[in-house]
Image (cartoon, coloured by chain):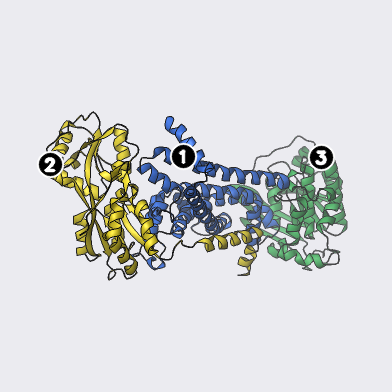
Amino acid sequence: MKKVLAILSFPCMKTLFCVVVVTASQVSYANDRFITLQSTTSTANSGLYTAILPAFREETGITVNVVPVGTGQAIKNAENGDGDVVLVHAREAEEKFIEDGFGVERFDVMYNDFILVGPGSDPAGIVGSDSASMALHKISVSGSIFVSRGDDSGTHKKEKRLWDDSNIDPISDSGRWYRETGSGMGATLNAAVGMNAYTLTDRGTWISFSNKQNLELLYQGDDALFNQYGVILVNPERHPHVKQQEAQIFIDWVLGKNGQQAISSYMLDGQQLFFPNAK
Amino acid sequence: MGQALHHPNIGPYDENLLPLVIESAWYDVGGQNLINGLDLRIESPDITVIMGSNGAGKSILLRLIHGLLELTSGAIKWGGKATDNRLRQQQSLVFQKPVLLRRTASQNLDFVLKLPQNRRLKRGPNSSTSAQLLKMVGLHDKANQPARSLSGGEQQRLALARALATRPKVLLLDEATASLDPASISIIENIVLEQKALGVKVIFVTHDLAQAKRLADEVVFMSRGRVLEHSKATEFFLHPKTEVANAYLSGTLSVEETHQ
Amino acid sequence: MQDILQSLLLAANLVLSGDSDLFEIIGLSLRVSLSAVIYSIFLGLPLGSLIAVGNFRGRQALMIVLNALMGLPPVVVGLVVYLFLSRSGPLGWMELLYTPTAMIIAQVILITPIVAALSQEILSQLFEEYDEQFRSLNVPRWVAVRALLWDARFNLVTVGLAGFGRAVAEVGAVMIVGGNIDHLTRVMTTAIALETSKGNLALALALGLILITISLLVNAGLFLVKTRSQKQKFG
């Protein structure tokens, strides 16, 4: 023990010790009342939260810490208890989340739609296709490159369903014309730009994405491309630390008049990105 | 048996260090016998000079005596005791290449003076401060210079001052003046003679024949990891008993191979 | 090319206009990574010293492990720390996930092996030089360690810099355990990743340029301090 103290008496160590105490004591958090929202890159990257959350905070004094990840990871994190609320867009996964006892109840919040984007020259000729799955069919037949999220996100789940409808199994060509980035929407769009390829994206991310280069919106409007967002309170029975009260305030707000209005008034480049549809 | 060393500065241990007895000492490294069944008995309290050509095993012998290396077999005893920390405490070794801390000259001495086992020295009546030690080796005006920026000779003088800071009863020097400037050599030799006068046992490994003649009271001549001759200095320089020593003294022998 | 020019202008504009979001992010980056370096020094330096000076069984194995850990992918560290700090993990009750503290923890794990391995290398070299002299002087082991640390302090600064460089530049670990939450856990690298994913390449690059500049300034500053004091005092 004496020896340890002797080493501590080393002048340099003393300074270090002080610095550590100082840095450790600096760690404090901006706001006592906060909730953690596990959400998607599509909503976060589009700037929606930056636009609507300040109003919520002003009304309620609650800070919302948004963790932007893919829907799959958001749900996984929430299952681990690392969040109070989930706001994602993959209905089946959300329902399973509740069924498994991790979530309390799911509510529709808002929707937008998915679109197919690709090179302006449209080598696969998908413009004017009868349906989204027909468009995908054309892409696969032409051998044009299609970039997939490949990350189990809401967008990825939707894309897989569309491939099922087109009776094509792109996975068997993974690495050739079908390329899975395993990344977020933005990174995948960057990859599509780089490869001059087709991809499926939500409209919000597309409008707010600033590196479009040769890529253009080529197909939209199929009912199958409907993109519904839902909000779920993480089950306090499963994870007792969930800030049920604050989280419920947030859910009530986002489903209520003020929240819904904030969502519909968020515009980018003169376009509305999300359409509120809470019941 | 041997005679007690008289030391004016009463050391921590009032023990008989002499005679130094080395019995059938072997030291092997990688299958090479660097020390080769060596026997030696040193009783003289004066200056013993160890000579021999490169590779004869002089420096290794000095480290074995000091306890920095361990014998493969055999025994080394100071006044009947094997070298341990306590015994080493009473010895100082000046290396051929001085190893100085990356600090100023006086901080190098303070480091030794402030070692826990040496704190007691400071309170003694004859205690020396780093300033006094620096003065002794003629470095008083370089106290605050980085030790490693000193010249080779100055560095070795500082190393000698450090060696004496612990008030050793035995001073070991390993070719301590090799390739130094003449002024430094003379300062170091004078201090060595002073220490002898104070009753410090000196064992000096050197290559330099002239230096050996200036300092030696007795000579140990080594070859191939063994002692070939051990005699009074005057006798050795005038009448070497062996061919090898004769060749060495006449300058026709310089490097020898060690035994396999 | 135009992108790069545009980024330079944007970077200059952000810095000169005193963009408060930018300075918040820079501040957090520095706070997290500097704290991580300091804690890593506390853990890594004793470990490095122990291996340099110690003579114990498993020393070699420990060295090999440390050297291997120097190459730990940040994202793996992030994942492991996430699993521990997650509410379902063993340390979930500490409520550290998605806080700067979690980011510091991940970076400490990331750079402690670097600090330990590099300091061990520096100290071993010095110890080899001093060892015989120290044994001759009967220097106690703990005094020897102190002397080594003190005499190598200028070289050890480089170790800290190496650690800081890796900490401030990594994105994988802080992204997972920090969550890249705006105004809470967003640092330079996660902001760069975010802007890249938004397609704001010029802004992302501008942030990158600022990060490089900060790194350069920190390095240059410490280098100056190091050479100055070394020259003045220790030739």
Q: Quadrant of residue B197?
A: bottom right
Is disc 2 in the same subunit as disc 1? no
Label 1 sits on a secondary structure element that is helix
- The chain that appears green in the image is B
Specify few, some or many for label 1: CA neighbours under 10 Å numbering under 14, 14-19, or 20 or more: many
Q: Chain of mark 3?
A: B
Amino acid tagged 1:
Ala
Residue flagged by tag 2: what amino acid is it? Answer: Ser
Q: Indicate left or right for B115 with C163 as reference.
A: right
Report x, y in % for residue A91. Answer: 20, 55
Q: CA distance from mark 1 to mark 3?
A: 61 Å
Specify the subunit that label 2 lies on.
Answer: A
Chain blue in the figure, letter:
C
Chain under numbered label 1:
C
Q: Quadrant of the C terminus of chain B?
A: top right
In front of the other: A191 or A231: A231
From the image, state whether disc 2 or disc 3 is nearer to you.
2
Give the residue number, with chain letter if any, for mark 3. Answer: B181
Residue drawn at x 57%, y 56% as measured from the top left: C49
Expressed as whole percent of the image width and height from the top left, the position of residue A177 reads: 22, 35
